[in-house]
């Protein structure tokens, strides 16, 4: 069947909604990256198996939905029961029978499986009441956890392809560009460049061929929201691309997906086939005569390919070395044709803006920063996972309310945002509004949205060293300031972390950074010194402690630390002895152990193994 | 070492015979053999009309490709930011000690290859280790031991 008019789309949806009403209960099993890793596949299989055997009125095997990421990854595997909005955390296969009996056949809540507030230990049964969800506004992530990613019907049922229908059937390309411009949608990939302006300038270029490209490379370590969207709601991405292609006049689209995300490739491929089958993609979309073919390109693992000019070269089968951008890619992009490149989350916002209008969109968020932003909240925070909040939300709200504060209630030290191009914000920044402009003025950036929370046991010199080493290995090597400059910065950071640094080294690094920023060809190099610059400006004391006192206050840099067992706390459980790979710890059962400092390689395995916090770092 | 190269023409044939298919062809070859055999590269160059030098430059530029044969189990320790902050370096070292090889190497018996990677996209479950396609979330010392014990 092909859908060829708005009426047909409406009728089709009505049928789906009616069919769905017949299901009195739905079991939403999260199949996001975190939950899959903790075995959610077996759980959904078990549900299907047991429901096939059992007869419960209004509940068939169709009630089991493999959904995209529920986002509360810390508590995975997650299962939600709809429509009661019950959230079960850390579900095991053996819990399935009980869930079916009590919450699917009956209306009981199993208290043991629901979320418990870590402070009051109060049980919270439904997810809108869980603080992690309470303060979020989910637009780009709206369907994650709510629909089966591999079923276009599910997407249409919740309003999918409405935006595309409205654009193609009721608007001109100029109208669409106008609406997106008015909505002030800014690129969610990190740069924050207004999408409407990008589309308009691409359309304005004289050319017979144009392209739309979706950047699903997500090279930023520590971020995985694009992955969750592509895997959990692939149709949103396609729909956004259809609208964009219609607006700029493109008939071919490319999605560049990271090679580490094979499931995203599979789900997108399925989504493309389904959408083409219904006439919502491919030739003659919705009977309008407009055509768009979308192709998937698998990236091959190069961080620099997140950069637009490198990405386009890579799509064309080349080495992904960025070029200088005298001519922008909206003029000369893929195969030298005008190209619009946006990232996954940007496209995910587009259908909503078209359906609800620009004004609705600008009513959410902060001035000049309309809408929401998705973040992957990870690191030393209690509730890790994916979140989406209105622009302008404070860091404090994100870390302490949504994130539930720090692991083990340790002191907060900072948040790293924006990946290797971003920077570290400190405690004094906790009340800042999180939006493109504010983060940039404080030396960090939005980036694609990784938010890595750090506690007092994270060493900032080590963090800077870590990012520099990442960038050194990911630099494409084409231009000297980046290739050599970052290498030297890394060498100096190593020296400081090993206690061989001097205060002149800090000055050297600052001057060198300036040159790398000025002289590099592309974004990787230009922003490469950011992790260093932001840590030195916010955490200079920590650098000085390494240099002057040969001390690593966080207890991380191994050349400067020693581990010792506190005999008072050690109960002689031998856990550390078996964890130590170099046999540096000796002792007998129930007697306090000792570490042989000569043998100790300071790997920290004993600290991780100790359950009594008996190993101190100096 | 000899490999069954009969499959190579079929893999190349899956895509249009043009230079822009290069990366995709290489990905499929890599998938089939778990590395890029030299002879396969020569065939690819010829069929797609790409100079062999370019095939090599693409093969060595991207992390996904390897010119060396990998072990039966590829252990990938994520050392991305989220994992780094939660102790990935220790996991890496413990793996190195347990397998008696350094990251990037393959054990002499060809059973394990140890790699470190920039982020596998399961950051909320840090630290993460992958064995072939499988994820092992929230890795601890014991996880390392268990994974390696399988040899
Ligand atoms: S940083 Fe390790 S999975 Fe992302």
Image (spheres, coloured by chain):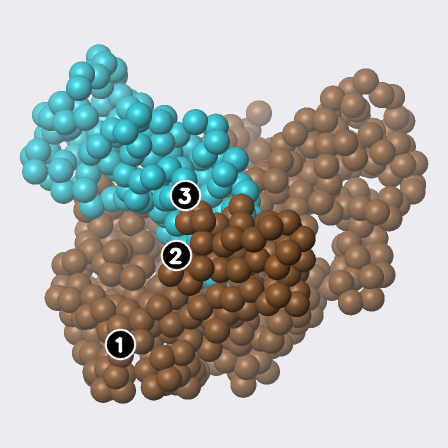
Chain colours: A brown, B cyan
Q: Chain of mark 2?
A: A
Which quarter shows the C terminus of chain B? top left
Task: Please give the name of the residue rendered at 24% of the width and 61% of the height, measured from the top-left corner.
Answer: A472
The alpha-carbon separation of the residues under discs 2 and 1 comes to: 22 Å
Task: Please give the name of the residue rendered at 31% of the width and 25% of the height, measured from the top-left corner.
Answer: B109
Packing grade of label 2 (10 A; few <14, some 14-19, many >=20) is few
Q: Quadrant of residue A430?
A: bottom right
- Whether label 2 touches label 1, CB < 8 Å: no
Horizontal arrangement in the rendering, residue A361 relative to residue B95 (left or right): right
Q: Chain of mark 3?
A: B
Task: Please give the name of the residue rendered at 20% of the width and 34% of the height, measured from the top-left corner.
Answer: B67
Q: Earlier in the sequence, mark 2 or mark 1?
A: 1
Q: Position of residue A196 (x, y in %)?
A: 42, 65
Which quarter shows the N terminus of chain B? top left
Q: Position of residue A187 (x, y in %)?
A: 43, 64
Discs 2 and 1 share one subunit: yes
Horizontal arrangement in the rendering, residue A352 relative to residue A515 (left or right): right
Residue to which mark 2 is pinned = A599
Taking A114 as reference, is A612 above or below it? below
Q: Chain of mark 1?
A: A
- The disc placed on residue B95 is 3
Front residue of B114 and B31 = B114
Q: Position of residue A182 (x, y in %)?
A: 50, 70
The alpha-carbon separation of the residues under discs 2 and 3 comes to: 19 Å
- The disc placed on residue A500 is 1
Give the secondary structure at mark 1: loop
- Whether label 3 touches label 1, CB < 8 Å: no
Whether residue B133 is visible, yes or no, is yes
């Amino acid at each position: 069947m092909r859908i060829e008019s708005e009426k047909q789309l409406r009728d089709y949806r009505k049928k789906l909604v009616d069919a769905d009403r017949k299901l009195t209960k739905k079991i939403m099993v999260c199949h996001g990256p975190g939950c899959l890793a903790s075995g959610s596949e077996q759980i959904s299989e078990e549900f299907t198996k047991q429901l096939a055997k059992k007869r419960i009125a209004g509940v068939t095997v169709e009630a089991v939905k493999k959904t995209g990421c529920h986002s509360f990854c810390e508590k995975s595997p997650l299962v939600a029961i709809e429509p009661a909005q019950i959230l079960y955390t850390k579900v095991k296969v053996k819990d399935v029978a009980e869930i079916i009996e009590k919450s699917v056949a009956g209306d009981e809540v199993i208290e043991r499986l629901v979320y418990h507030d870590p402070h009051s230990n109060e049980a919270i049964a439904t997810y809108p009441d869980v603080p992690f969800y309470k303060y979020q506004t989910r637009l780009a992530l709206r369907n994650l956890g709510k629909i089966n990613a591999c079923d276009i019907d599910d997407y249409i049922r919740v309003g999918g392809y409405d935006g595309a229908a409205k654009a193609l059937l009721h608007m001109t390309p100029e109208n669409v560009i106008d609406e997106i411009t008015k909505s002030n949608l800014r690129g969610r990939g990190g740069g924050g460049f207004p999408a409407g302006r990008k589309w308009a300038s691409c359309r304005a270029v004289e050319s017979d061929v144009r392209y739309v490209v979706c950047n699903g490379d997500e090279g930023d370590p520590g971020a995985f929201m694009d992955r969750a969207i592509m895997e959990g709601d692939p149709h949103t991405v396609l729909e956004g691309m259809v609208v964009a292609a219609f607006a700029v006049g493109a008939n071919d689209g490319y999605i560049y997906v990271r090679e580490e995300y094979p499931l995203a490739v599979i789900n997108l491929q399925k989504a493309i086939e389904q959408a083409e089958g219904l006439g919502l993609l491919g030739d003659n979309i919705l009977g309008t005569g407009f055509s768009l073919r979308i192709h998937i390109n698998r990236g091959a693992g190069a961080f620099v390919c997140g950069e637009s000019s490198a990405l386009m070269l890579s799509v064309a089968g080349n080495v992904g070395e960025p070029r200088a951008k005298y001519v922008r890619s909206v003029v000369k992009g893929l195969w030298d044709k005008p190209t619009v490149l946006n990232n996954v989350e940007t496209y995910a916002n587009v259908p909503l803006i078209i359906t609800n209008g620009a004004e609705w969109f600008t009513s959410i968020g902060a001035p000049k920063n309309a809408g929401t932003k998705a973040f992957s909240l990870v690191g030393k925070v209690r509730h890790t996972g994916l979140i989406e909040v209105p622009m302008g939300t404070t860091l404090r709200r994100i870390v302490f309310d949504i994130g539930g504060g720090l692991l083990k209630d340790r002191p907060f030290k900072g948040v790293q945002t924006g990946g290797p191009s971003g920077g570290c914000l400190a405690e004094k920044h906790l009340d800042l509004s999180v939006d493109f402009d504010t983060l940039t003025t404080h030396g960090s950036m939005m980036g694609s949205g990784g938010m890595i929370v750090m506690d007092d046991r994270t060493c900032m010199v080590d963090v800077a060293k870590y990012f520099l080493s990442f960038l050194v290995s990911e630099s494409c090597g084409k231009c000297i300031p980046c290739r050599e400059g970052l290498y030297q910065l890394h060498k100096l950071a190593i020296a400081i972390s090993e206690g061989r640094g001097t205060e002149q080294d800090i000055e050297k690094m600052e001057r060198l950074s300036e040159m790398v920023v000025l002289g590099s060809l592309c974004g990787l190099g230009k922003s490469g010194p950011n992790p260093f610059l932001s840590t030195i400006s916010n955490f200079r004391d920590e650098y000085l402690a390494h240099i002057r006192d040969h001390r690593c206050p966080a207890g991380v840099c191994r050349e400067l630390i020693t581990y010792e067992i506190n005999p008072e706390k050690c109960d002689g459980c031998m856990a550390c002895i078996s964890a130590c790979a170099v046999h540096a710890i000796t002792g007998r059962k129930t007697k306090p152990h000792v570490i042989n400092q000569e043998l100790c390689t300071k790997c920290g395995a004993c600290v991780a193994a100790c359950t009594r916090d008996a190993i101190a770092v100096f | 070492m000899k490999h069954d190269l009969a499959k190579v023409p079929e893999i190349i044939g899956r895509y249009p015979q043009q230079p822009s298919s290069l990366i995709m062809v290489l990905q499929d070859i890599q998938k089939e053999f778990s590395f890029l055999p030299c002879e396969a590269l020569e065939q690819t160059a010829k069929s797609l009309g790409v100079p062999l030098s370019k095939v090599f430059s693409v093969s060595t530029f991207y992390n996904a490709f390897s010119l060396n044969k990998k072990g039966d189990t590829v252990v990938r320790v994520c050392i991305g930011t989220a994992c780094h902050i939660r102790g990935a370096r220790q996991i890496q070292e413990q793996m190195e000690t347990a397998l008696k090889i350094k990251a990037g190497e393959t054990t002499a018996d060809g059973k394990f290859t140890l790699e470190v990677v920039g982020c596998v996209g399961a950051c909320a479950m840090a630290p993460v280790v992958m064995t072939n396609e499988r994820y092992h979330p929230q890795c601890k010392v014991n996880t390392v031991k268990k994974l390696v014990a399988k040899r």
